[in-house]
Image (spheres, helix red, strand yellow):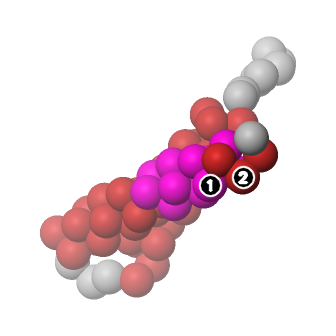
Amino acid sequence: MPKMNLSHFEASLLFALFTSVVLGIITKRTDRERVRHAVHCFGYFLLAIFGLSWLMYLGHG
């Protein structure tokens, strides 16, 4: 089995994608609501990832 070597950013995106899909599936009733909720959650995850990474970058300097 090949070993996956992901960067921290890639792992964060993968986590955001899978978590958004699961949240969309388990929290809404119709397919349209599920897709919409999953996309919103993914957007919020991306916002949090970029926001926190900039905060860490600026705080580290």
Examine the structure image and report whether residue 60 is included in the region drawn in magenta.
Answer: no
Tell me if mark 1 has few (under 14), some (14-19) or many (20+) residues whose alpha carbon lies within 10 angstroms of its own.
few
**Mark 1, residue position:** 55
Q: CA distance from mark 1 to mark 2?
A: 6 Å
- Helix, strand or loop at label 2? It is helix
Q: Of residues 38 and 29, which is closer to you in this image?
A: 38
Can you see residue 40?
A: yes
Number of labels in the image equals: 2
The answer to which quarter of the image holds residue 28 is: bottom left
- Helix, strand or loop at label 1? It is helix
What residue appears at the point 77 percent right and 22 percent down from the top-left corner? 5
Is residue 26 shown above or below 58?
below
Say which mark, if any, is on residue 42.
Answer: none
Given the current orientation, which residue lies at the most extreme left position?
Answer: 32
Given the current orientation, which residue lies at the most extreme front position?
Answer: 61
**Mark 2, residue position:** 59
What residue appears at the point 80 percent right and 16 percent down from the top-left corner? 2
Region rendered in magenta: 46-57
Percent x, y of residue 6 = 72, 27
Percent x, y of residue 25 = 40, 71
Percent x, y of residue 31 = 22, 69
Q: Are marks 1 and 2 in contact (CB under 8 Å)?
A: yes
The answer to which quarter of the image holds residue 27 is: bottom left
Tell me if mark 2 has few (under 14), some (14-19) or many (20+) residues whose alpha carbon lies within 10 angstroms of its own.
few
Quadrant of the snapshot with the N terminus: top right
Q: Of residues 58 and 27, which is closer to you in this image?
A: 58
Given the current orientation, which residue lies at the most extreme top position?
Answer: 2
Examine the structure image and report whether residue 55 is included in the region drawn in magenta.
Answer: yes
Is residue 29 shown above or below 23?
below
Q: What kind of residue is marked 1? A: Leu
Q: What kind of residue is marked 2? A: Gly
Percent x, y of residue 34 = 29, 70
